Image: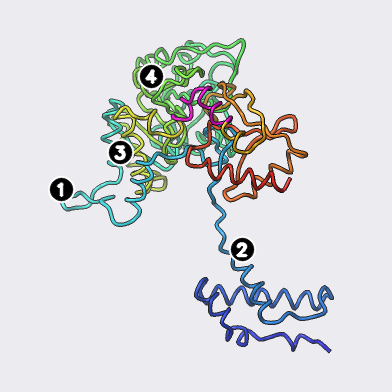
Amino acid sequence: MTTLRNLPSIDQILQTQMAAQLIARYGRPLTLSAIRSTLDDIRARFKSGQITALPLRDLILAQADATLIAWTKPTLVPVINASGVILHTNLGRAPLSDDTIRAMDVASRGYSNLEYDLEKGARGSRLIHAESVLQRLTGAEAAMVVNNNAAAVLLVLSALANKKRVIISRSQLVEIGGGFRIPDVMKQSGARLVEVGTTNKVHLRDYEEALLGANAIIMRAHPSNFKIIGFTEEPELKDVVSLAHAAGTTFVDDLGSGTFIDTAKYGLGHEPTVQESLAAGADIVCFSGDKLLGGPQAGIIIGKKELIEKIRKHPLARAVRADKTCLAGVTATLLHYLKDEAEREIPIWKMISLTPKQVKGRAEAWAANLGQGAVVEGESTVGGGSLPTESFPTFLLSLSVPSADKFMKKLREQNPPIIARTADNKVLLDPRTIQPEQEGALLVGLKNALRKT
């Protein structure tokens, strides 16, 4: 009669060659844990009657190996973005330029002068990195980089508006991805929210009336993926800034995406640029590094030197500081703009600048390679909270399959996974968001999925 006494002991299992191989691959502690977990599972299934025969050592080790593979498999993996959403937040937003990747790789491989002044031979500050490039690029008096734009806004308000009133239009009290709400950020910073105007209309006089009280600053917040259309009105940025300065107070502009390039030149709506904000006289401007800037995740703060110094000295600055790889990547990305090569070198701008004819040619080549699929007109979007409701023309590879949902699942099971979109039970793939070096893997993945359909 088979009993649990017939189950091999851990010591017996460890004496096998396969166990030695697993230890060499995964280390002894993790391998022991996997073997124990496997044996516990076998005991539980045997006691419950799910199995009546106990597995031999080789099968136990095979199960332990499968467990180790599952435990050590990366959860963050590259994917092919065929969705047509350029700054796809769920897919990591902006892919990086070759120079940016190289700079981050170099910074991560060894030691660096992150907080060391090479000229003085003494401790320095990480906050100076990227500052000179930002000063030259924007003309701002000072600049600093933190780990994302939400942190930048929180830090700025904490340093400049704690126990002060922050005047902001009701139309800008938005919630963006991940439940990030502008009113909540203000509350967390210690600032007191003062709403002006109505949801759809705010006038300059609304700001004037709010400024009659003491201890106030004015802030503009980018609406991100929210847009009000129809019966709306809002004063010009320069007029609100002039009003703030006439009252002797500070104007903070949270630009969100923070583009340096006018999106209107590509047939899209106009996204407020960093240059426009500074030209209007904003004292502090915050924007993201991984949206329309096209770099790694970061929050960038530029503006008046005396205000930046105050922000730098705030205790929260250390909690939200950027690491060496981020600083290296942001600097390399900014250099593309400084050298007037952003549209040639930064992937998202290369995607935006592709003409419909160029996209169509790639889609047609895919269809020819696959021996199936139709090339149809479609729309691409910027995404990432930039230019909501805006889209621009593209061409799509349309695949007719028995079940679009089942085929999409097969695409996600490929290596690398392929993320597409569906419409009318058709699977649609947009060449605009697929980098040229990914096309080979894309076609292999599509053929594998089609073969199993």
Q: Earlier in the sequence, mark 3 or mark 1?
A: 1
Mark 1 and mark 2 residues within 8 Å of each other at the beta carbon: no
Q: CA distance from mark 1 to mark 4?
A: 36 Å
Q: CA distance from mark 1 to mark 2?
A: 50 Å
Please provide percent x and percent y for residue 311: 35, 37
- Does residue 363 belong to the magenta stretch? yes
Residue visible at 59% across and 37% down in the picture: 369
User: 169 and 437: which one is in front?
Assistant: 437
Q: Is residue 424 above or below residue 209?
A: below
Q: CA distance from mark 3 to mark 2?
A: 40 Å
Instruction: Kindly identify which numbered label has been placed on residue 178.
Output: none
Q: Dot 2 corresponds to which residue?
A: 70
Q: Secondary structure at mark 3?
A: loop
Q: Dot 3 corresponds to which residue?
A: 130
Q: Secondary structure at mark 2?
A: helix
Q: Which one is closest to the eye, mark 3 or mark 2?
A: 2
